[in-house]
Image (cartoon, helix red, strand yellow):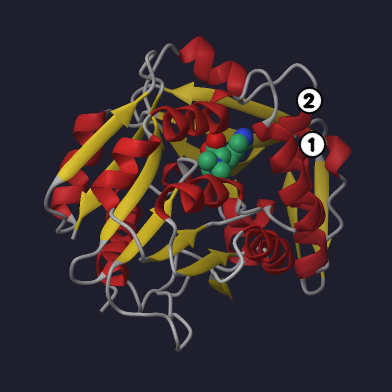
Amino acid sequence: MPLDASIEPLTIIDALKRSPARIASKYFYDNHGSELFELITRLPEYYPTRTELEILNQFGEDIALAIGQGLTLIELGAGNCEKSQTLCRLIQPSHFVAIDVAEEFVREGANRLRSAFPGLITHTVAADLAVPITLPTGVPYSKRVVFYPGSSIGNFDPADSLALLERSHALAGKDGALLIGVDLVKDPAILEAAYNDADGVTARFNQNILRHANCLIGSDFKPKHWRHVAFFNNSLSRIEMHLEAKTTTVVHWPGGERHFASGERIHTENSYKYTPKILEDRLRQAGFGQIDVWMDARRWFAIVLART
Ligand code: AVJ
């Protein structure tokens, strides 16, 4: 059983009323936000996506050998399913399950995968990874590989990331495995450039969370009135993203409002950066056994296979 089944997540309004205010990162990903994130992954400054693909391509055969063939691939936060395409070529799964918060987006991704791999049985699940995941009937119980690429685990604080690893361990089941991509600690200048791109795509991605909030709670945020702020918090080993009020503002929604002073921030994202050691320790704490690690030559990113 997942550990945190009883904890109610904060609602958007509760989190907005707090000091400092917060909007949870999962709200970046409405359809427009998912498209902006796709643009981010192609930015010259944003190295994680291409470095992870580089590792998958360079060590693909070793990874495929370590995983085995004919299994069920379960991708968490699947997005456009692009990385699973590469992985499917390598391990030829019989079943594929794509799980993501952006339902329409992940459906399209799974459709593309089905046309690329005729015979592959695919399922999509619209789910928030912060809560327990139930798989549709028809997904085999044995030989499951949970794939969690893109350093998406970076959005979870240490306690929540452990809970997520424990849920992944349970999801993978007996004789299963977790294949996870994590962004590694490096020169803060490189980290900060990746979240402050010259074209301002990350700024638009950050501001888009306000438009999504407007849709969800009926608020009247004006995204252009908020400045994108991103920096590396060294003591907590994480990139933090915030939206900073350019002027004093009042945001209203049906039944409430919140005053923001000029310069006051809304915390929108944490992106934790790992060392291989910290990840390995956490995986063991979550119950995993044998662990294999693959990294690019610069050691900027790691792909880790952990067996249940
Ligand atoms: C999807 C959470 C891995 O933290 O790098 C990219 C999201 N935010 N640029 C990351 C993100 C700003 C991304 N993750």
| Numbered label attached to residue 200 | 2
Q: In which quarter of the image is residue 233?
A: top left
Q: Quadrant of the C terminus?
A: bottom left
Kindly identify the residue that appears in the image at 48 percent across and 59 percent down. Answer: 76
SS state under label 2? loop
| Numbered label attached to residue 204 | 1
| Numbered label attached to residue 192 | none
Residue 269 visible here? no
Kindly identify the residue that appears in the image at 37 percent across and 28 percent down. Answer: 237
> How much space separates mark 2 and mark 1, taking CA atoms?
6 Å
Few, some or many residues within 10 Å of mark 1 (<14, 14–19, 20+): some
| Residue 11 or residue 36, whichever sits in front | 36
Q: Position of residue 175 (x, y in %)?
A: 19, 66
Q: Position of 111 compared to 131: left or right?
A: right
Q: In this view, does 290 lie above or below 225?
A: below
Kindly identify the residue that appears in the image at 78 percent across and 57 percent down. Answer: 31
SS state under label 1? helix
Q: Position of residue 52 (x, y in %)?
A: 47, 32
Q: In which quarter of the image is the N terminus?
A: bottom left
Q: In which quarter of the image is residue 303?
A: top left
Q: In which quarter of the image is residue 133?
A: bottom left
Marks 1 and 2: in contact by CB < 8 Å? Answer: yes
| Residue 286 or residue 149, whichever sits in front | 149
Q: Position of 255 compared to 143: left or right?
A: right
> Label 2 amino acid?
Gly
Q: Position of 187 compared to 21: left or right?
A: left
Residue farthest along the bottom direction in this orientation = 137
Indicate the quadrant of ligand 1 in the picture.
Answer: top right
Q: Where is residue 171 in the image (x, y as percent from the top left)?
A: 32, 70
